[in-house]
Image: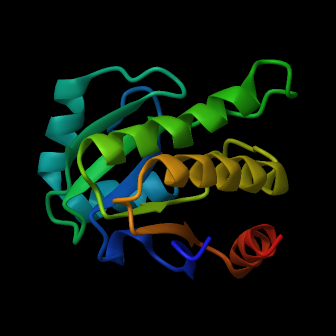
Amino acid sequence: MHRVKIRQGDITQLHVDVIVNTTDYGLAVGNGASDAIRHAAGNEFVHACQAIGYCPNGEASVTPGFRLPANMIIHTVGPARRGGEHREEQLLASCYHRAMIEAKKHNVKSIAFPAISCGELGFPVRRAIKIAVAEVNSALCQNPLLETVVFCCFDPLTAALYRNQIGK
């Protein structure tokens, strides 16, 4: 896990090759981290997302980083928690899995993730973190070129939960 870092702060300020945008199906709309990414990336971001169109839940699409320090943005649609009976855990795992596939495909050396589905979408944070860490660990075994994965957390509690999970 030495390639995995935890940061608390604004994902749009990170100097990594790629940041992951957790968004809704239309890509150009979202709240939390997605809203911050949209504003920091600029108007070109919205146009690029509109050109891509629809992205299914658990899938990923790629755009340039535009005005961000990151060169690229991988967009993924995280699941809303609906009682746990609608494959939410598998869809969340797929978000991380697909993002890591895109990172490998584009020879990325560093990538940053927000806490996908943990905000307004209501996914239980501890369970989401276990899924995120498991998927990233699995993908790191398959991608020796990826030097750094950052879990960027908005608040200190989520950062502490990630640190605790990685320490296990």
Rendering colour mode: rainbow
**Number of numbered discs:** 0
Q: Is residue 20 visible?
A: yes
Q: Quadrant of residue 55?
A: top left
| Residue appearing at x 85%, y 19% in the figure | 85
Quarter the N terminus occupies: bottom right
Quick check: 146 above or below 118?
below
| Residue appearing at x 29%, y 51% in the figure | 73
Quick check: 96 above or below 98?
below
76 with respect to 28 (left or right): right
| Residue appearing at x 48%, y 46% in the figure | 142
Where residue 70 appears, as percent x and y from the top left, is 24, 65
Quarter the C terminus occupies: bottom right
Quick check: 1 above or below 19?
below
Where residue 134 appears, as percent x and y from the top left, is 69, 50
Q: Quadrant of residue 75?
A: top left
| Residue appearing at x 75%, y 44% in the figure | 122
Q: Quadrant of residue 82?
A: top right
99 with respect to 41 (left or right): right
60 with respect to 84 (left or right): left
Q: Is residue 118 visible?
A: no
Where residue 165 appears, as percent x and y from the top left, is 79, 67
Where residue 90 appears, as percent x and y from the top left, is 70, 28
